[in-house]
Image (spheres, rainbow, N blue to C red):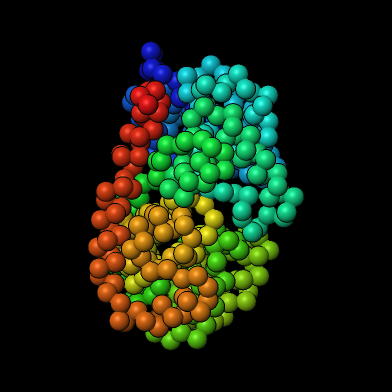
Amino acid sequence: MYKNKKRISILGTRGIPNRYGGFEQLAENLVKYLSNYYDIKVFCSSRHNKNGPKIYNGARLKYLPLKANGIESIFYDFLSLLLSVFDDKILLLGCSGGILMPFLFFLRKKIILNIGGLDWQRKKWPKMAQKFLKISERLAICISKVIVSDNKAIEEYIKNEYGRDSYLIEYGGDTAFSVTCTDTDYKLYPFLKKNYALGIARIQEDNNVEIILKAFLDYQKFPVVFIGNWNDSRYGKKLFNKYKAEKNIILLESIYDKRILNLIRSNCLVYIHGHSAGGTNPSLVEIMYLGKPIIAYASKFNLYTTENKALYFYDLNSLINILNSLESINLDKIKKEMKKIAEEKYKWEIISNKYKILFDDII
């Protein structure tokens, strides 16, 4: 089945099929588009994927009994690297294992590193954890042969901070699809009958979740629907209990059913994206592909992703001002611009072909 094919290992994710996040989405789509060309092995956490398949879309799945996040992620990535010694190329997603990579310097020529976002900047981490993550990032970037940045701002950061060039390869958004509401949908989600704003994010401080919710406390024109993992942290539970009774705020737990998720996404009036730390965010390019007007937090990452053609807020007051001005804004123009950018840049076939160039050493 895999005879004479170049061996590629993908590590640093919880695993596929994807139901977790950006790196998992990337791994799943690389497998989808490239498994005919390579013998691909994807490392998965058996702690996150119980009774998972051994083969997925032509790729072999290798399960390790460690978590892919938290402190265990260091050893998860290290063990994955050790088990990739005989592979031709190693795509390492994230820098968690960077602290131990000096012990694997002999693998340097094989490693393609996608650092993702600047994880050490996230407000959820205490100061010591931020310093540790920064050191891991530095070691991973210095040791890896090839660096991938998923956003122009990340590319600039790597060049300015470490003096290294990187290859700009974003994420795809064309897995998102429009869904027309049925009578059953209206019964399950009555808010679909009228206009609503939508937010989707992991519930953590750097995603500006509370700013978005506060903006709708006194806003009367339409509600906000916010989808997130409210029960996974103290912070999430605190926000949920604080805002769950507000009549203009609808809080939903994470939704993994793709039809339902796309149903809610494709019928919103406007999408509010609060992410402040990271690169090109998958949920953002997916909503762009659906052609929705976007109000985004004015980080460099979001400005580059949307090519400065969306609406941007900096704090609570600026978000409230945008909401109050929506009737005078040409939302149709923003819709078309978001869709056009996504069609030209954020398609998985385009993204996969860029990785293929790296795997084949055509650089």
Q: Residue at x 58, y 61 (%)?
A: 206
User: Does 248 appear above or below 234?
Assistant: below
When asked about the image quadrant of residue 64, the answer is top right
Instruction: Determine the residue positioned at 65% across, 44% down.
Output: 134
Residue placed most toward the observer, 114 or 243: 114
Q: Position of residue 13 (x, y in %)?
A: 54, 39
Whole-percent x and y of residue 324? 40, 83
> Considering depth in this image, is 158 or 42 the residue closer to the camera?
158
Near-viewer residue (254 or 281): 281
Picture residue at 35% right of the left edge, 50% below the top: 173
Residue 50 rendering spot, x and y as whole percentages: 57, 39
Residue 62's quadrant in the figure? top right
Q: Residue furthest right?
A: 128
Q: Is residue 151 left or right of residue 77?
A: left
Image quadrant holding the N terminus, namely top left
Q: Quadrant of residue 330?
A: bottom left
Q: What quarter of the picture does the C terminus occupy? A: top left
What residue appears at the point 50 percent right and 70 percent down from the top-left corner?
314
Is residue 18 among what the camera can see? no
Please indicate whether residue 128 sits to the left or right of residue 83 in the image: right
Q: How many marks?
A: 0
Asked if residue 13 lies left or right of residue 268, the reply is: right
- Residue 216 x %, y %: 49, 80
Q: Looking at the picture, does residue 350 appear above or below residue 111? A: below
> Looking at the picture, does residue 222 appear above or below residue 11?
below
Vertical comparison of 56 with 282: above or below = above
Residue 335 seen in the current view: yes
